[in-house]
Amino acid sequence: MELERIFPGKTIVFGVAGCIAAYKAADLVSRLKKLGADIHVIMTQSAGELVRPMTFQTLSQNPVHTDMWAEPKKWNVEHIGLADSADLFMIVPATANIIGKIANGIADDMLSTTVMAVKAPIVIAPAMNAKMYDNPIVQTNIEKLKDLGYHIVEPDYGYLACGYEGKGRLPDNEVILKAACKALSSEKDLAGKRVLVTAGPTREALDPIRHLTNPSTGKMGYAVAEEARNRGAEVILISGPTMLPPPKGMKVINIKSAVEMHKAVLDHYDETDIVIKSAAVSDYRPADIADKKIKKDDVTEEQLVINLERNPDILLELGQRKGNKILVGFAAETDDLLTNAKAKIEKKNLDLVVANDVTQEGAGFASDTNIAKIIYRDGSIEEVPKMTKKELAELVIDKVKKLVP
Ligand code: PMT
């Protein structure tokens, strides 16, 4: 339904790079054409070795561009004209080569030169051998593009044309269509909004080298912050200690303890429109912090007890001064997921809660995927099947967007 609404009348410049999956791109172009989009295909020279330009010309009903130096058919500079005309730019399949060129500002053929001049959203669907995909240089280039707001469609895991099995397959066209639809419809819909996201664990010190903590890696919260940034919001990410690189295009504040997170969040609360608290905040901290390492022999059997005191419940405090801000909590539960999560909405005065049962395989801490229930203030519940944390982040931001007045 969404596809039928979004694509009619849209101009899509569609790049095809030299990967065997180029044959699947022909079907995608046909699908987009049937959905009412005006498609202009640019093929790299290697793509032309795998699938003939005539295939794409016939399916798109437009001339296919392959050559920077072909005689222009219009008065304007062809690659700039194409870039300007695009409502959406797609590269399917995208090879390590084209990804590397874009990430490093190399423009040496029609596709890499045109994409450099594009202001429209850009969807890139990488497809290549699994070892190539895993190569840290390719991964760094992909991360760089993500940071710059390019929409990257994760490749699938499975049998690859080169005979290997692994991650690198071009996903089904339905998945790419969904990503294209999303890029077209949701682009910058949070522009002008200030979003505060918390992520990762807190560390509650016992002494200078020991602490109480939890297994949060920050993956969920960072994905939410990146999605909010991609949608045009001004983002502040308040992060506990993680191994993740700080995302670009947002203010990142690193904290360690819940007390530090409490201060950082309150310092920025007044200037914020939306708060999404995916951090796993420790509810307690050791009542005493030794200023030197506690030595094994310094502690008697009777002293083998850690006295705790309560940390501030940050979200509870935000809820007490909610005003017209949108407040989203996460709930990590091991039992009675719905009852506990619903109680948190009430108690903390939230608009919605993303509840994950952290005992489920592929949900909660550390995994790249999550399984959630989105629970609203009115008691309604949306079940979210297993999906990547990036996809869940997109969904959460979609829900939040609907709440923005
Ligand atoms: O980081 P990952 O490895 O990707 O893992 C993701 C996750 C499991 C950490 C994430 O999906 C998640 O569930 N985050 C919330 C974990 C949690 O602390 O839940 P809670 O039920 O204890 O707290 C409920 C809400 O209150 C949370 O939004 C929490 O940030 C907030 N809270 C909790 C305690 C406290 N003292 N202050 C708070 O603000």
Image: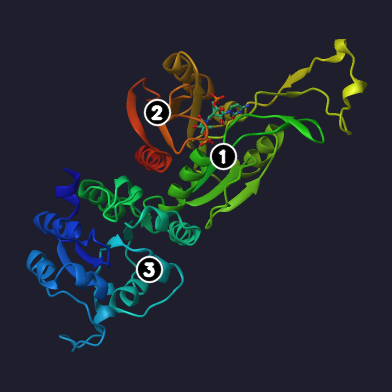
Q: Nearer the viewer, mark 3 or mark 2?
A: 3
Q: Amino acid at mark 1?
A: Thr
Image check: 269 left or right of 5? right
Q: Amino acid at mark 2?
A: Ala
Residue under label 1, please give it. 198
Residue under label 2, please give it. 372
Decide if residue 191 is in sight here: no
Look at 20% across and 72% down and name the residue there: 49
- Most extreme residue toward the top is 302
Which one is nearer the viewer's eye here, 387 or 252? 387
Question: Closer to the N terminus: mark 1 or mark 2?
Answer: 1
> Few, some or many C-alpha atoms within 10 Å of disc 2 (few <14, some 14-19, many ≥20)?
many
Question: Which quadrant of the figure has residue 258?
Answer: top right
Q: Considering the image in quadrants, where does the N terminus appear?
A: top left
Mark 2 sits near ligand 1, with its Cβ under 8 Å away: yes
The image position of residue 200, as x and y in percent, is 58, 37
Q: Amino acid at mark 3?
A: Asn
Question: Closer to the N terminus: mark 3 or mark 2?
Answer: 3
Which one is nearer the viewer's eye here, 10 or 116? 116
> Few, some or many C-alpha atoms within 10 Å of disc 3 (few <14, some 14-19, many ≥20)?
few
Question: Closer to the N terminus: mark 1 or mark 3?
Answer: 3
Classify the position of ligand 1 by quadrant: top left, top right, bottom left or bottom right.
top right
Q: Residue 97's mark?
A: 3
Image check: 325 left or right of 34? right
Q: Is residue 317 above or below residue 16?
A: above
Q: How many marks?
A: 3
The image position of residue 59, as x and y in percent, is 9, 64
Q: CA distance from mark 1 to mark 2?
A: 18 Å
